[in-house]
Image: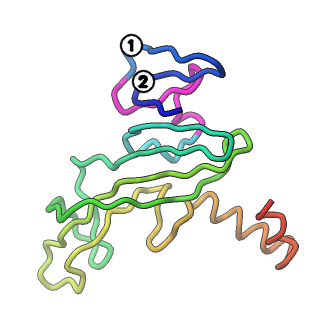
Amino acid sequence: MFYRHAEVVAETYVRNYVGFPTGSLWLCSVELVSLLPQLANVLGVSFEASDAVVVVQARTRSVDPAECTGCGQLSDWRHNRYARRLADVTLAGRPVRIDLSVRRLYCENVTCPKVTFAEQITGLTTRYQRRAPQLQRLVEDVGVVLAGRGGARMLRS
């Protein structure tokens, strides 16, 4: 099943709610951001729940300038967009995958070693990571507590 914007999903039926802000996703009369607060800084595009996985498609807010990861200067000079696929903590016992469209921007500082950089979303993305920070912390904690193979077995199941 595939749902867009302000549609509300229940077990056996779909109702359309009017008046909810565009970019907000609602699941069984609950705003998705209340279930996954790390999505507060992005625009929700769609939500798909299957037996195996929950997929949230989102995009960054294009109006805000982003900070260069090389020099820290703000820039809104857009190069292009690309898709990031992030794993996140489970929702109702199902793994969550966030398909996030982020901007790649030019750095406007001529002395910066980076010509382009990808914007980072606070609380959701970290450079070079394919996991949301909350899931990364969980994986690290399990690895420390269960030490090695036991933790790896638990995380696979």
Residue 88 lies left or right of residue 73; in this view the side is right
Q: Which mark sits nearer the N-terminus, 2 or 1? A: 2
Asked whether residue 29 is drawn in magenta, I would say yes
Residue at the image point whose x is 20% and y is 83% from the top: 112
Dot label at residue 6: 2
Do the numbered discs 2 and 1 sit on residues whose CB atoms are within 8 Å? yes
Residue at the image point whose x is 66% and y is 22% from the top: 11
Q: How far is the residue under mark 2 from the one under mark 1?
A: 7 Å
Q: Could you say which quadrant of the image residue 140 lies in?
A: bottom right
Residue 52 lies left or right of residue 105; in this view the side is right
Give the labeled residue for mark 1: 18
Q: Could you say which quadrant of the image residue 74 lies in?
A: bottom left
The amino acid type of the residue labelled 1 equals Val
Q: SS for tag 1?
A: loop
In the image shown, does 112 or 2 lie closer to the viewer?
2
Q: Quadrant of the C terminus?
A: bottom right
Residue at the image point whose x is 41% and y is 39% from the top: 44
Q: Where are the magenta residues, as a range?
A: 21-35
